[in-house]
Image (cartoon, grey):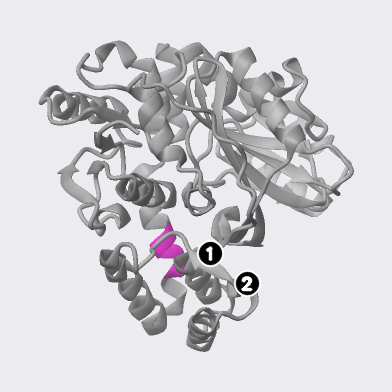
Amino acid sequence: MGRAKRVLVSEGSSLSSREIITALGVAGHKVGVCDSNAICLGRFSRFVTHFYRCPRFGEDPWTYMDFVIQIAAGGGWDVLFPAHEQALLFSREKARIPPGIALAVADFRSFLEVQGKVSLVKTLARVSLPQPAWRVVRTKEELESESRFPFHLKADFTTASKAVWRINNGEELRKKSSELSSQGLLDGNEEFVIQEHVEGRLERVLAVFDRGGLVAMHGYRQLREGPGGGDIAKVSVFRPEVRRYMERLGEQLEWHGALSTDYICRSDGERPLFIDANPRLVEPMNAVLSGVNLADILVRVSMREPVQGRGPAVKEVRTHLLLMALLAAAAGRRRRLDVLREIVRVIRGHGIYAESREELLPLLTDFRGAVPLAYAVVRLLARPASSAALSAGSIASYSLSAAAARQIARVG
């Protein structure tokens, strides 16, 4: 391994960025964070040596970009690490990045192949990756003509699954159709994806590519769903067939940098069906604890250092995110007792916590994570109904609005 690098992370509010910070830190790198929230989750880490209060990315991506470029031009950092939706903007503005700072992102044309839900389903079809049946709709009449329930309705641009809805029957369809129409979103200009619902296990795979070649990857299965469709508990998995599909996708897109995908496994004997993609690393600590530090590998790829291909983890590793579990417990029945029960389960190692390790705020590795965890516990016990506000506040700091995403794509 080469010397430790100075890595500037693009945001610090998301779960993925917090795990990226830990992954970079345990690999020995010096970490800096840009975020609009002065008390973001990532700031409470012993691995963060510098914090930069920046403009809010989702509201004004161009001002945010100017700020990051100014920091990068100072010469204090070796690598610019896109932790979330900032990757799209960095790809678009790659020519403006100072030459002294390394960045591994795919070409902008490749980004547009997977960034939007409409582009993604078309790309998966083009490169022959299996996916559930889908079609694109633009009007209220097209939407309400759907008669196969249940299905998923997806807005073209969305962050943290905020604009993905499961529609179970005609009544729900008419209600959602009227809601979108009242917002002027079914006027024939906006596109939505209707996708067949498939029962099965949700799994995710994280990969790092070097100019189209797959360097390393890691997969895990969701054991318990959390708020917004995220993960509370997961277990590592390896599927050779998924690896072959990822190799094909990376080669066809000439992908450079990080790429994560979600897929459904109906049973071990059937092929996976891909349902989503994110041009970044999604919560990479299960991979780290499995022996594959994808964040460190992405730094090496960014620096154009030779990276030896990493094989799959052979040991099954279970991990959990206690913070997400507490938010889910509070959101359910909005009772303090449910929050306390979840804390007792994790302390005793019962249920999903049996032989499982904390990945989001691993206090033995990074003791400063106790601060946001303690804050969340106190707030949820005082007012369980505040769980939604806690989640929404974090998402607002890093999310890219649909309007801003279209603006970036249109400029490109």
Q: Is residue 145 magenta?
A: no
> Relative to 18, is 195 above or below?
above
Q: Looking at the image, do the residues carrying marks 1 and 2 touch, with CB atoms under 8 Å apart?
A: yes
| Residue at the (53%, 72%) spot, across then down | 331
The image quadrant that residue 155 belongs to is: top right
Mark 2, Cα crowd under 10 Å, few <14 / some 14-19 / many 20+, is some
The total of numbered circles placed on residues is 2
Q: Which mark is residue 320?
A: 1
Query: Bounds of the magenta span?
Result: 387-391
Query: With 384 as the anchor, is 259 left or right in this view?
Result: right
Say which amino acid is labelled 2.
Answer: Ile
Residue at numbered disc 2 = 352
The image quadrant that residue 234 belongs to is: bottom right
Q: Nearer the viewer, residue 398 or 404?
A: 398
Q: Is residue 389 magenta?
A: yes
Q: Secondary structure at mark 1?
A: strand
| Residue at the (68%, 20%) spot, across then down | 248
Q: Nearer the N terminus, badge 1 or badge 2?
A: 1
Q: Is residue 138 visible?
A: no
Q: CA distance from mark 1 to mark 2?
A: 8 Å
Residue 16 picture location, percent across and down: 43, 47
Mark 1, Cα crowd under 10 Å, few <14 / some 14-19 / many 20+, is many
For the view shown, which residue lies furthest in the left direction? 74
Residue 258 picture location, percent across and down: 48, 30
Q: Main secondary structure of the magenta part?
A: helix
Say which amino acid is labelled 1.
Answer: His
Q: Secondary structure at mark 2?
A: helix
Residue 128 picture location, percent across and down: 77, 20
Query: With 136 as the anchor, is 269 left or right in this view?
Result: right
Residue 163 picture location, percent across and down: 58, 43
